Amino acid sequence: MKETIKNIKKVYQYGKEYKKHLFGLIFAVISSIVVGLVVPVLTAKQIVYFTSSLWHQLFLISLIILCVQAYISFAAMFFTRRNSHYFQRGTMKNLQIELGREILKISQKDMDTNSSGMFIQRIINDTEKMTSFIGWGSLNHIRHILTNIGALLVTFFINRQVFLYYLLISIVLTVLQYEKTKQKGKKDIEFRNQTENVSGLVGELIRGSRDIKMLNSKESFMKKLEGEISIQNQKRFDMSKINRTYVYIIETLKAIMEFGLVVLLIYLVKNNTITIAIALALYNYKSGIMNLVMENISALLDMTKDFNISCDRVFSIIDNKEFEKETFGKKHLDKIEGNFEFKNVTFSYDEKRNVLNDLSFKINSGDMVGFVGKSGAGKTTIFNLLCKMYNVQNGEITIDGYNINDLDEESIRGNITIISQNPYIFNLSIRNNLKLVKENVTDEEIYEACRLACLDDFIEGLPNKYDTVVGESGIILSGGQKQRLAIARALIQKTKIILFDEATSSLDNETQFEIQKAISNLKEQYTILIIAHRLSTIVNCNKIMLLEDGRIVDEGTHQELLDKSNTYQLLYNTEMIK
């Protein structure tokens, strides 16, 4: 109970702007409960009048019951649902937005080691369970429970023996329902975790369908998916097994206790303790006390269990309990010059093998620098650390003389753009993909950026031109077109530092030449770093750094490295042969 109250308070913080709807909902529920409490009394009188042939009184009492039920239906089915809809919708929106923000703060290391399905489940399913509990869902069950408890209290004034019997039944069945919910809750956590695994794998199937087909790995992938789904179904079966066992026990006990109730009522009538009319009225309360109360208690307990589990899963992210969050400093730089330096930087992704080893180098504002080396030499890692996607284990990185750990997020990522080998393109129009980095960008800026990125001719040939939706991950675009769109996106963002991570690798020679010209035209305004396997991409750089095993083993211009570095000569000659 304490946990539930604490979670309700936390969820309410995300919905308090809609509190008038919540209070309207609560008022409607309370009023329907109060009115509903008189129904058992009226029903008892209805039976008495019927068995006593008091037709006039029976008509009037039936009319009153009709009015009461009409009000309850109006309050419960219209007013409460309307207010509940507004409160739940607004609260869920705020929770999902906050959760999305917090997920974007999770360290890249934790993002890499967890499936997207887990985060999707928590944003969509768990937030829905949390808000529905506070809204109509739980309050409706509470309304039914309190109304039918009213029927139990009426029996207290009619006959104490029947009241005690009903009370005993209620306690026994409630304990059994509680145990059922507790046992199911343990299995539900396992089921949800496995559901996240399945969701993640299904996401991989959809996003990676092309590669799965091309690799001819459909059967092996489906075998993996089948295994995960089988485990999920087993977890679901384990929950239903607990439910079936307890339902059987509860229903059997209810049947026995109903028989006992009949025996008790016969005994009371034969001993002239109650009349037959009163016995019928007391027996009529059976469905409300033994069935509806238990059904609603069971449903409320299940909802409470779901609510608390979902709160744990959502707030473990929001409250930084489960995942490591990115950390930034407080120093803000409105504008940077573009100078940065690596000082004795050592880094490892898995704390077993160092990717960078005591790496030191310095880049000046306006430089255009190329990084070359074999795969695994540490080139992309340099970019990841500069963008603070990961934190260095040893050493220091500075931007304009400031330690990167002292700078706030905007100072770093608001001034650095990275264009990767496989840029992520959103399922939006070309225009809206570009607006993501600058909401108030003008059409002229969009056209100019696409012209510099050698993309304008392609866009003009599309039926909807800049309003063409590119599909999930930019499916309608070729690899080179995706990279050119990412380059246009960077040009619109106008950050001081632009990092090209194999960004021209998928382009044909003619387009690459055009983009190289565009990049060269930016030299005076930007600090540009380029990772390249194709050395033709970086021949015009001010400086080229050659990496091996996380260290810079040589540096210089293209011609200088050709003259003095055997490794660079080998890389260049290999490319020429190709």
Image: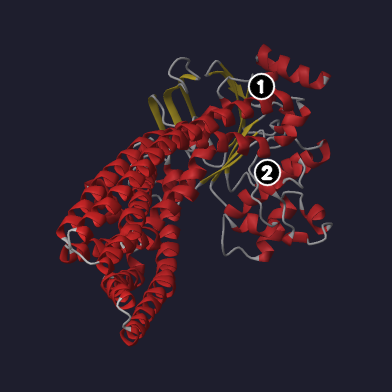
Residue occupying the far bottom of the picture: 56
Q: Is residue 47 above or below residue 270?
A: below
The percent coordinates of residue 355 (x first, y second) are 50, 20
Q: Which residue is mark 1?
A: 560
Q: Position of residue 537 (x, y in %)?
A: 71, 33
- For image coordinates 73% across by 45% down, the residue present is 475
Q: Mark 1 or mark 2, which has the lower sequence index?
A: 2
User: What residue lies at 36% left-to-right and 46% top-to-bottom?
Assistant: 255
Q: Quadrant of the C terminus?
A: top right
Residue for badge 2: 519
Q: Secondary structure at mark 1?
A: helix
Q: Is residue 371 visible?
A: no
Q: Give coordinates of residue 256: x percent, y percent.
A: 33, 44
Q: Does the image show residue 137? A: yes
Q: Nearer the viewer, residue 489 or 338?
A: 489
Counting other residues with Cα less than 10 Å from the Cα at mark 1, is it few (<14), some (14-19), or many (20 or more)? few
Residue 239: % across, % down: 44, 35
For mark 2, give the secondary structure.
helix
- The residue shown at (41%, 28%) is 392
